[in-house]
């Protein structure tokens, strides 16, 4: 996208973390915003903050996993703003545990948000994006969308799927004036570990502490990199040195890289497992 001034951006998962930071970054670039989340109070706080800069802001309390609600959302956004130029499928949740220990209800919950939420966003907003003079889709994958990680099998599966969807859309929409960027964050300081579903609630403090230890990048820094990638038209963006390390490891020696992940997993022992 050549300009963000007076463009309309839809951001899911906008009440906290990267979504909240993206709302602020895009507002600072001149975007009007349609903010989407299940957290009504969080949305209201973000809306108040970004609207102070003179941007037009609407809030939409929607579960991205809800097909009917997502199908109705584009018309609500267009009614409020007149158009849609940028869609950011950012909403995401976490699920911790080995594959054999995960209840299928929890698996469906995660896939509903992390995968179906992205599919819903792309499917229902694309007709409106195609009408814009220039438009862009941003899909949030993960470093776990580059390598399968133990105790995150379904999370990794969802993020690999988002990556595949994004790469396919990038090709399919290449001549339609709709760009696509897939984002692979590494350790970004968000609340995803605190809100994740765990197989053992007694492990939550250890899981959160470990996440906080490795999460070095602020959401604001992540948001700035993402918006810059949209401006450049980049098909993907990697966030954090660990993401580059894993990406290159999987490119150069995919089997060896997975063996290293397995060695580290078992060497760390039960303190983090």
Image (spheres, helix red, strand yellow):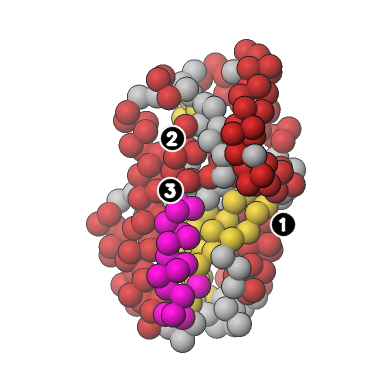
Q: Position of residue 197 (x, y in %)?
A: 46, 30
Which tag is nearer the camera, tag 3 or tag 2? Answer: 3
Task: Determine whether, in the image, residue 137 is placed left or right of residue 147.
Answer: left
Q: Position of residue 146 (x, y in %)?
A: 57, 44
* Whether label 3 touches label 2, CB < 8 Å: no
SS of the residue under disc 3: helix
Magenta stretch, residue numbers? 162-179
Sequence order check: which comes first, mark 1 or mark 3?
A: 3
Q: Which residue is mark 3?
A: 161
Q: Residue at x 54, y 59 (%)?
A: 182
Rounded to the nearest whole Å, what is the CA distance between mark 1 and mark 3? 25 Å
Q: CA distance from mark 3 to mark 2?
A: 10 Å
Q: Which mark is residue 221?
A: 1
Q: Is residue 165 magenta?
A: yes
Between tags 2 and 1, which lies in front?
2
Query: Residue 53 shows which numbered tag?
Result: none
User: Where in the figure is residue 154, as x and y percent of width and height?
Assistant: 43, 35
The stretch drawn in magenta includes residue 74:
no
Distance from the alpha carbon under mark 2 to that under mark 1? 27 Å
Relative to 205, residue 2 above or below:
below
Mark 3 surroundings: few (<14), some (14-19) or many (≥20) residues within 10 A: some
Q: Give me the residue at 51% from left, 20% from top.
A: 201
Of the numbered discs 2 and 1, the one sitting upstream in the chain is 2
260 shown above or below 176: above
Q: Which mark is residue 154?
A: 2
Tell me what residue is drawn at x 43 percent, y 48 percent: 161
* Residue 254 found in image quarter: top right
Q: Is residue 143 left or right of residue 169?
A: right
Q: Residue at x 67, y 69 (%)?
A: 228
Image position of 75 (left or right of 236) = left
């Amino acid at each position: 996208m050549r300009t963000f001034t007076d463009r309309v951006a839809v951001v899911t998962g906008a009440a906290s973390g990267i979504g909240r930071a993206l709302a602020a970054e895009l507002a600072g670039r001149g975007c009007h915003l349609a903010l989407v989340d299940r957290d009504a109070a969080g949305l209201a706080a973000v809306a108040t903050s970004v609207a102070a800069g003179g941007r037009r802001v609407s809030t939409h309390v929607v579960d991205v996993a809800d097909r009917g609600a997502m199908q109705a959302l584009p018309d609500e956004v267009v009614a409020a703003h007149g158009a849609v130029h940028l869609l950011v499928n950012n909403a995401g949740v976490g699920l911790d545990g080995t594959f054999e220990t995960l209840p299928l209800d929890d698996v469906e919950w995660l896939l509903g948000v992390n995968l179906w939420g992205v599919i819903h966003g792309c499917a229902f907003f694309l007709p409106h994006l195609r009408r814009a003079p220039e438009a862009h889709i941003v899909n949030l994958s993960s470093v776990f969308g580059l390598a399968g990680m133990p105790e995150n099998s379904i999370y990794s599966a969802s993020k690999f799927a988002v990556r595949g969807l994004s790469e396919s859309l990038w090709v399919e929409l290449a001549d339609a004036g709709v760009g696509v960027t897939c984002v692979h964050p590494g350790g970004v300081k968000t609340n995803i570990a605190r809100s994740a579903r765990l197989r053992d609630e007694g492990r939550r403090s250890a899981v959160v502490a470990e996440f906080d230890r490795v999460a070095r990048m602020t959401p604001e820094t992540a948001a700035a990199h993402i918006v810059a990638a949209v401006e450049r038209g980049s098909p993907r963006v990697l966030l954090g040195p660990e993401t580059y390390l894993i990406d290159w490891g999987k490119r150069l020696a995919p089997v060896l890289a997975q063996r290293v992940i397995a060695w580290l997993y078992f060497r760390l022992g039960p303190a983090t497992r």
